[in-house]
Amino acid sequence: GVATLDAKHGRTFDDASERMTASLLVLAKDNDLGRVDHVLLSNATADKPAGHTLFVVKGEPSVPANKRAAIPTELAAQTSVEESM
């Protein structure tokens, strides 16, 4: 989840992490994921930097048929827990 992403990028779990977690929970519920097996950051593209988008994935990310949903990272980090719920 978000704590794993934080650790991978040398960050500690903080208030922004908590807001992201709440945003991703609602995103997963709204998209009928049932469970989230992976939380991933987007790769860089020609017009967007790496990490611009957060993805939640049910099952293996390498399988195109698996359910997934996405949200802009900045939106997930800035939306309060109360607003998310």
Image: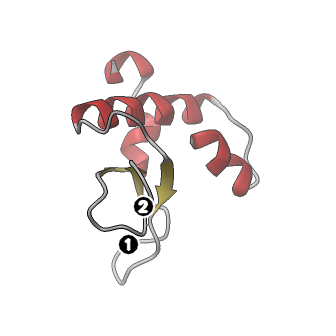
Give residue 27's position: percent from left, percent from top.
Answer: 31, 36
Q: Which mark is residue 52?
A: 2
At x 60%, y 28%, the residue is 15
- Horizontal relation, residue 65 to residue 23: left or right: left
As rendered, which of 33 and 41 lies closer to the eye? 33
Q: Which residue is mark 1?
A: 48
Total numbered labels placed on residues in the image = 2
As rendered, which of 15 and 5 lies closer to the eye? 5
- Horizontal relation, residue 73 to residue 14: left or right: left
Helix, strand or loop for disc 2 = loop
Q: Residues within 10 Å of mark 1 (few under 14, many from 20)?
A: few
User: What's the amino acid at mark 2?
Assistant: His
Q: Which mark is residue 3?
A: none
At x 42%, y 61%, the residue is 52
User: What's the amino acid at mark 1?
Assistant: Lys
Q: Tell me the quarter of the image containing the C terminus.
A: top left
Locate residue 30: give its quadrant. top left
Give residue 7's position: percent from left, percent from top.
Answer: 73, 49
Cβ atoms at labels 2 and 1 below 8 Å apart: yes
Q: Is residue 77 above or below residue 46?
A: above
Helix, strand or loop for disc 1 = loop
- Horizontal relation, residue 39 to residue 11: left or right: left
